[in-house]
Amino acid sequence: MRSRLEPLWPPIVVGVIIMSLWEGLVRLLKVREFLLPKPTSIASALGDEWTPLRTAGWETGKTAVAGLLFGVVAGALLALVVSRFSWLRGSVTPLAVALNATPIIALAPIFNAWFGITDFRSNAAVVIIVVFFPVFINTGTGLSEVESNQIELMRSLAASENTVLRKVRIPNALPFFLTSLRLAAPLSVIAAIVAEYFGGPQNRLGPFITQNASFSRYANAWAAIVVASAIGLALFAFSAVVEKISMPWKQGDPARA
Amino acid sequence: MTEQAIVASGLGKTFNSRSDSAVTALTDVDLSVEPGEFVSLIGPSGCGKSTMLRLIGDLIVPSEGTVEVFGKPAAQARADRDYGMAFQKAGLFDWRKVSANIELPLELAGWSKSRRRERSAEMLDLVKLPDFGDHYPWQLSGGMQQRVAIARALSFQPKLLLMDEPFGALDEMTREHMQVELLSIYRQLRSTVVFVTHSIPEAAFLSDRVVVLSPRPGRIHSIIDVVLGDRETETRDEDTRESEGFFRKTTEIREALRSVEAQQ
Ligand SMILES: Nc1ncnc2c1ncn2[C@@H]1O[C@H](COP(=O)(O)OP(=O)(O)O)[C@@H](O)[C@H]1O
Ligand SMILES: [Mg+2]
């Protein structure tokens, strides 16, 4: 039990120190609230605005999770298909790379046109594309980077390509896939909020931040940012737990912990 | 005449033959191996030892000549699961426990779970790791992992064992130990072995015959019979390494390798 709690207290201590310094410096230097509100002001804004913030956080969270799910499934499935039918590699992978090189947020207004400017799907579409790429690339790497001797061993045993995929490539790709999930989870929240800046329903964190900032209610905007990072952190923690429990063979391995 | 385990005739392999980076790794190899024989391939690095092993195992297709294994084309032998293979890297699968690694070939051959369990337990005894079935590979030392790889290669009692420097990454003491164990397993299972090595004492200790290859392009330089006493009754153990006959054979192999190098 101790070993589980140990990694928790250092960030808490550091967090408390940073908050105290922040509070102290803002008071000492008399920094004006619109530049940087005090943590205590943010905390009270969080309390005052809790009802709209909870709704906004819940809705933005749903967009992020929906986009994350679809993006992860699409990325992993396409990686599988490309790995199994290697003639696709030459055509699909460069396309995916080109897609990734596109500043994806530039697509947000286009999705607004496709799905309607007040439809949440135009936000979720941005999340899907942002999440898709790291999952596709990482999973693809894991599927192809198998020791050549292991493939030769399977072939010497007359294993078919499908068997090699099932018994070797997929388990080999699992750690790669889970790493990409851990990367993609917080990314999905960022993508959802940035997409919301461009349109979509109004009761979301993105509009909440822009509206409060435009009325100079910066403590409220910061309170929304706190909610957003809490969602990102929760998704990250969830994927880290998934990573732990789905690879029992890594438990206690010092080389891979 | 009894059926040969391996008959290679006019065997050769050129990689990238259609480009200007063509490499003739092996050419003009004629070799027969009898059932039950232990044959080593030795030669300087890059002389085509691994290429020859892969040709026999139908992992690559010859550019010239043919390989027959137990009277059928190598591709058929592979389809019939006649081959067990082991490499320098143990190549165990991280996500499988030791016993599941040993059972992989049995799984592919469609054995029932209980039969697989029974066999992997036998194999673990054979390679002297009876208590390690439930461990994951990372919990084992390099030598132990290599023993598991050998147990995996032998689990389904393949007719032909192909080994590519399986002890190459082990320290000298472990290596000598593993050689003794391999010989004892080989005698128990009466398999046929083709064994790639670049260690002279290893080749002399293990083999009935040592095939010395010369490079660029790889071809058979000479074949040395290693009989250390009466063929049927001879035993090889740690004392063999200090015997007169063993010393003479290592010298003979060493001289063959020197003349290979002098040719270059
Ligand atoms: N897949 C390949 N493509 C091109 N050249 C290869 C390939 N495999 C081996 N070779 C070349 O063939 C020669 C023999 O290689 P190899 O059989 O691995 O030698 P050894 O096992 O005796 O060290 C080397 O020159 C090597 O570079
Ligand atoms: Mg080699």
Image (cartoon, rainbow, N blue to C red):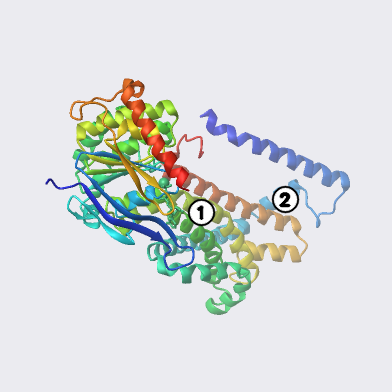
Select label 1 or label 2 by which is in front: 1
Of residue B74 and residue B105, the one placed in the foreground of this image is B74
Whether residue A246 is visible to the viewer of this picture, yes or no, is yes
**Res B11 label:** none
- Dots 1, 2 in contact, CB < 8 A: no
User: Which residue corresponds to mark 2?
Assistant: A42
In this rendering, position of residue A86 left or right of residue A192: left
Q: Earlier in the sequence, mark 1 or mark 2?
A: 2
Q: What element carries label 1?
A: helix
User: Do discs 1 and 2 share a chain?
Assistant: yes
Whether residue B132 is visible to the viewer of this picture, yes or no, is no
Of residue A108 and residue B90, the one placed in the foreground of this image is B90
Q: Does the residue labelled 1 lie within 8 Å of ligand 1?
A: no
Gap in Å between the C-alphas at discs 1 and 2? 31 Å
Q: Is mark 2 within 8 Å of ligand 1?
A: no
User: Which residue corresponds to mark 1?
Assistant: A181
Chain designation of label 2: A
Where residue A80 appears, as percent x and y from the top left, is: 41, 61
Name the amino acid, label 2: Ile
Q: Which residue lies furthest to the right in this view?
A: A29
Of residue B36 and residue B119, the one placed in the foreground of this image is B36
What residue do we see at 28% from left, 33% from top?
Answer: B226
